Image (cartoon, rainbow, N blue to C red):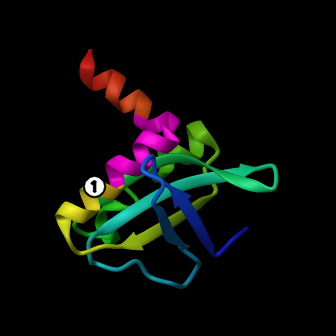
Amino acid sequence: MRNLIDVTGASGSVYRFHRLRDGRPLSAMGGNYVYSRESGDGYEVVYVGQGENLLKDAHARWDEAVKTQAAAHLYTRLNISERVRQHEHADILAAAQPAMNARRRKAAAA
């Protein structure tokens, strides 16, 4: 398992995320986060989220991700600027197309 991962967006920009480890608290600052699972020699992003308070928001769908997607790791990226955070979120979503995000969009459209 990696402590850092680089996630590439559809634009080609690369975003560095830090793995949440036992004993390391989440920040109450804004940022982006990804849930991932092991995939061969790498990882697969199963959910991408963003929020104003990582301490509160980053765990919002974690239990679901573990149960339905075998998520094993939570990675975060601090980003106080809401505008930049939303841009990065959209860029990563467009490239990764995580399963949990796709299900949420389908449910919202129904």
Q: Find out whether residue 23 is within the magenta segment.
A: no
Residue 34 location, x and y as percent?
48, 57
Q: Residue furthest top?
A: 110
Residue name at image x 26 percent, y 25 percent: 108
Assign the N terminus to one quadrant of the image.
Answer: bottom right
Residue 61 seen in this snapshot: no
Using a 10 Å C-alpha cutoff, classify the residue at mark 1 as few (fewer than 14 neighbours), some (14 to 19) or many (20 or more).
few
Residue situated in front as seen by the camera: 62 or 102: 102
Residue 52 location, x and y as percent?
22, 66
Place residue 30 in its image quadrant.
Answer: bottom left
Place residue 25 in its image quadrant.
Answer: bottom left
Mark 1 belongs to which amino acid?
His
Residue 21 seen in this snapshot: yes
Magenta-highlighted residues: 89-101
Q: Residue furthest right?
A: 40
Viewed as shown, does residue 28 lie left or right of 19?
Answer: left
Assign the C terminus to one quadrant of the image.
Answer: top left
Residue 65 location, x and y as percent?
52, 45
Viewed as shown, does residue 42 lie left or right of 49?
Answer: right
Viewed as shown, does residue 88 lie left or right of 5?
Answer: left
SS label for mark 1: helix
Tell me the chief SS of the magenta region. helix
Residue name at image x 42 percent, y 40 percent: 94
- Determine which residue is flagged by label 1: 87
Residue 70 location, x and y as percent?
64, 45
Q: Residue furthest front?
A: 12
Residue situated in front as seen by the camera: 82 or 10: 10
Q: Find out whether residue 93 is within the magenta segment.
A: yes
Residue name at image x 64 percent, y 56 percent: 72
Q: Is residue 13 above or below residue 64?
A: below
